[in-house]
Amino acid sequence: GAVVSQHPSRVICKSGTSVKIECRSLDFQATTMFWYRQFPKQSLMLMATSNEGSKATYEQGVEKDKFLINHASLTLSTLTVTSAHPEDSSFYICSARDFPRGATGELFFGEGSRLTVL
Amino acid sequence: GQQVMQIPQYQHVQEGEDFTTYCNSSTTLSNIQWYKQRPGGHPVFLIQLVKSGEVKKQKRLTFQFGEAKKNSSLHITATQTTDVGTYFCAGSYGGSQGNLIFGKGTKLSVKP
């Protein structure tokens, strides 16, 4: 199956700093990638849909100035958590579809990035 | 908005017992997908159901899609310790490329 790589897997930062998380599709081109946030013992909350070459589409309640998404190429999307605060600590995970190979529309997930803001 | 409800939230079983998780949508789905997330891991696609009343099997796992395409279930026969993890259903309302709405997941623990 298609492979999505996410980096870093863990990051610890100080409050007020910014953190960038990368999501790469390794063996396919992804015009669309999705960013999720997962709280402990909870489901995947879709934050935004990242579109190559255009602005991301954010879900209701997600601050676009807080969570900057850039999808500059067909294989790379980045999520930058700006001026991070402890409440931003979470597991962030990206996914992509390998369309048209993945005709079922299944999502391939990255390994996730655990952010801890001190 | 559109929601996919999933129950139960947790299930603890003895190895060898069966397990079922259920998903329900108030409106008709285009399709439903199932994912498994092992502890510390990321979700991995299991299967997609598209047709009304569809039943698919993968070894000890049986997936069903309701006749009205509003509900789905995943049944595991004779659970094993390797089955532990959280099982998510994800419904689409916009075809195979529509956004997926994830259920809250069912966390399965299996006692040897």
Image (cartoon, coloured by chain):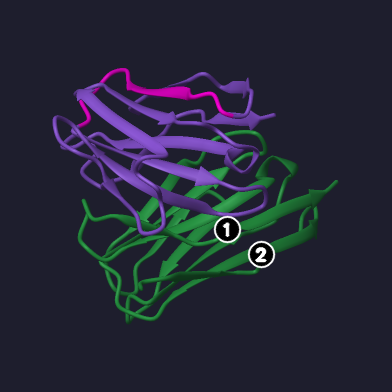
Q: Is residue A82 above or below residue A60?
A: above
Comparing A26 with B60, the one in front is A26
Residue A17 falls within the magenta-colored stretch: yes
Give the x, y percent position of residue B103. 49, 62
**Dot 1 amino acid type:** Gly
**Disc 1 to disc 2, C-alpha distance:** 6 Å
Would you say B7 lies left or right of A94 here?
right
State whether discs 1 and 2 lie on one chain.
yes
- Left or right: A4 as drawn, with respect to B22: left
Q: Nearer the viewer, residue A39 or B60?
A: A39
Q: Which stretch is magenta?
A: A16-30
Please state if B23 lies on the left or on the right of B111 as rendered.
left
> To which residue does mark 1 refer?
B105
Residue picked out by circle 2: B9
Q: Which chain is green?
A: B
Q: Position of residue B21 (x, y in %)?
A: 59, 66
Find residue A34 and report its image quarter: top left
Residue A89 percent location from the top left of the image: 62, 37
Instruction: Report if the CB atoms under discs 1 and 2 are less than 8 Å apart.
Output: yes
Residue at the spot x=41%, y=35% of the render? Answer: A94
Count residues near mark 2 (Cα–Cα under 10 Å), then give few for <14, some for 14-19, many for 20+.
Answer: some
Colour representing chain A: purple
Would residue B57 appear left or right of B97 to someone viewing this image? right
Label 2: which secondary element: loop
Q: Is residue B101 above or below residue A70?
A: below
Residue A49: x and y in percent read 29, 44
Helix, strand or loop at mark 1:
loop
- Three-letter residue code for mark 2: Gln
